[in-house]
Amino acid sequence: MIFSNWLRRIDGYALTWRLPVIIWQVLFFLAPLVFMIAMSFFLVKNYQMKEAFEFVNWVKIFSKGYFWSSYGLSFGLAFLATITATCIAFPASYCLAFKLSETARRWAIFFLIIPFFTSYLVRTFSWYVLLAESGVINNIIGYLGIGPIKMLNTMFGTMIGYLTLTLPLVIILQTLSMASIDKNLIEASHNLGAGRVRAIFSVIIPSARIGLIIGALFCFILSFGDFVSPYYLGGSNPPTLPILIIDTTKSGQQWPRAAVIATIMMVTLMLVALSAIKIAYKKR
Amino acid sequence: MSDQNKSNKASRRKFIKQTGVIATALSLPSILTSGKALGAPTEINMLAWYGHGEADIVAEFEAMHNVKFKPKYYAGGDNMLALIAQSPPGTYDLILSDGEFVQQLDKAGHIQQLNPSDYPFDDFIHDDFKKFPGHWRDGNLYSAMIRFGFLGVSYNRNAISEKEAMSYNCFWNKNLKGKVGHFDWHLPNLGTASLHDGNIPSPFNLDSIQWGKVQETMMSLRSQSGGFFDYGGSFNSLKNGEMLAMCGIGDWITGALERDGAPVTSVVPEEGGLQWTESYCIGKGSKKAAIANEFIRYLLSPKGQVKSASMAAYPAFCVTNAGQAALRKDNMFEAQRTGQIEGASNNPIKLINDGRIHYRDIPVQQSLEDWNDFWSEYKSS
C-alpha cells in the first residue's frame, strides 16, 4: 500500500530526465566509493588482496606519524593555494567583470580556457625550463646579482603547480559571478557615500559570495588531490597524501591501506565542501 | 511500367553493383595486408624495467622471428611481484626480475624451470654468476642472468671531486645541502646507508641494533635531501643541476647522461657498492615459452650482450666474456667508460674480486614492509 502510494507520487517525466545522471552517479561514483571503503578492510597476503573485514589497515595508517605529517602538509598546502589563488584571482576578475567591455571579457575568458587545451602534465613540465637553477628566471635575476634561488623540488614549486592547475578556473568562476552583479547596487553604494574599497567589501563580495566560495572550493579540491605538482615540481619532498597513496600501492601492493588514505581524503573533502556550501548559501 | 521507371530500376541496380565493386576494391589492400594474410606476429608479453621492450633491444629479434613484444614496465622488485600476483597464470611470457626477487618468484610458483644447457654459463665472466644466489633451487635453474651494474655514489663532477665521492660521507657534505637526491625506492637507499655503517659483507642481513643504526644514519641525511625521484626525475634532476649527488643509483642513470656529455658520473666508494642484477625468467603457464627462451639465448649471445650493455634507456655490464669482447670491438668508448677492459681500475670483475661489491638483496631479518614503512617515514620527516 505504502509502496504503491510512493510509486504513484513519482513524477515519471522528471525521473526520465534525471535517470541518466542518477545511473551515472551510482555506477561511477557511489559503487566505486562503496567498493573503496570495503577494500579498506581487506588484507594483503603474498601481494594478493584477500577479502576480509579487519580494522588492521585503519589502525596501521592512523598509528603512523608519516600519515599525519602528509595529511597536515596536504591540507595546509591546499588551503594556502586556495587563499593565494582567490587573492590573485580577485583583482583580475574585478577588472574583467567591471572594467572591460562585454566583447573583451569574452575574449579574456576564452584565453583563460586555452591552458586547459594542453595536458596538465605538459604544463607542469614546462615549468622546469623557468624554475630550474639553470633556468630562465634564475638566469635573469643572476644579472642583478641575485640567486640562484632554489625553486624546483620545494613547496614553492608545488604551489606554482597548484596555481597552474587552478588559477584560470578560479578567475573564470569569480568573473562570471561578479559579472552578474546588478551594477545599480554598486552605483547606489557610491551614491550613499561608499568609496571603491567600501563598495567592494559591502556590495561586491557579499553579492558574489557564492561564486567566490565555489571558486575557492574547486581550488581546494583540485589541489588537495593533486599528484603531479607535488611529485614533479615539489620533488615529493615531503610527500603529500596522493604521493603516499602511490607509495603505498607501489610497494607491497597495499591497496587496502591506500583505500584507507583515499577514504580519509574523501571524508575531508566532503566536510570542506559541505562547510563551504553552507557558508556560501547562508542567509544574511 | 514506364521506360523511365525501368531506367531508374536499372540505374539503382547498377549503383548497388558499382558500390559493391568499389567497396571490395577499397577493402582489398587491408584484406591483403591483414595479419592472417601476412602471418601475424606472435605477441610476447613482457614484464620488465623500462627500456627492455624498446626497439634498440627487441627490433632485430622481432624481425628475425616475426614476433612482437608487448612490454609492461615496472619500477622496483616489489612492484613487479605485485603485478604478477594479480595477473592470471600465463599472463607474462617473459619476466625480467631483479636478481634478489627471483627466489620470491620461484617460491610463489610464478616461473618455470629453465634448461641450463641452453645458456653459455661456461663463458660467464664470474663464477658467482654461474650459480647466482636464488636463481637455482635443488640443482634446477629458474632464471638466467643477462646483465648487471653497480650502485654507489653518483655525482656532478663540477660539485665534488672523485676523491670526495669515494666515500658515502660526501652525501653529508655541507656544500651539498638540499642537493642530494634519492632514487625513490627503499632497497638501494637503505642498502647504501647500511654500507656506510660498515655492515659488510651482508648489508641486508641486519640485526635489530644494526637496523636501528641504519635508520639513524638515514635520518641524519634528511636535511641534505633535495627530493625523491623516479627514473625520469633522477635523470632530469642530475642533468639540469638541481641535484648534485644521488643516493641509490649508479652508472645506470649517469651512464646515459655521461654519454651525452653531462658532467656527471658514478663511482663505487671505498665502503663498497651494491650490485643490481637483471635476470630473465619464463612465466609459468606461458604458451610461448620456446620463443621466450630463444629471446633469452639471443640476449646472451655476443650481439645481444652488446645491445644490452649499450641499451638506450640505461647501460649495464655484459655477463659473458664473448659479450665483453664484442662490446670492445663494437663500441670501445663504452667498454672503456665502463671499465670492461683488461686492467681497468673500475673493471667490474676486479671490484667484485676485491670484495668491494655486495649483491643487492631483500632484507633478511626484517620484512620488506618494515623497510618500506621506514622509507615513508624518512620521506615525510
Image: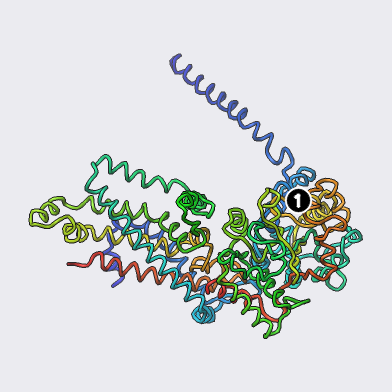
Taking the image as shown, residue B56 lies to the left or right of residue B332, namely: left
Residue at image coords 88%, 62%: B116
Disc 1 marks which residue?
B310
Residue at image coords 45%, 61%: A156
Residue at image coords 80%, 64%: B143
Q: Nearer the viewer, residue A78 or A23?
A: A78
The amino acid pointed to by label 1 is Ser
Residue sitting at the far right: B122
Taking the image as shown, residue B299 lies to the left or right of residue B212, namely: right
* Residue B314, image x, y percentages: 70, 54
Quadrant of the rendering where the N terminus of chain B is positioned = top left
* Residue B349, image x, y percentages: 84, 63
Residue at image coords 54%, 81%: A56
Residue sitting at the far front: A145
* Residue B326, image x, y percentages: 85, 49
User: From this viewpoint, is residue B358 visible?
Assistant: yes
Residue sitting at the far left: A192
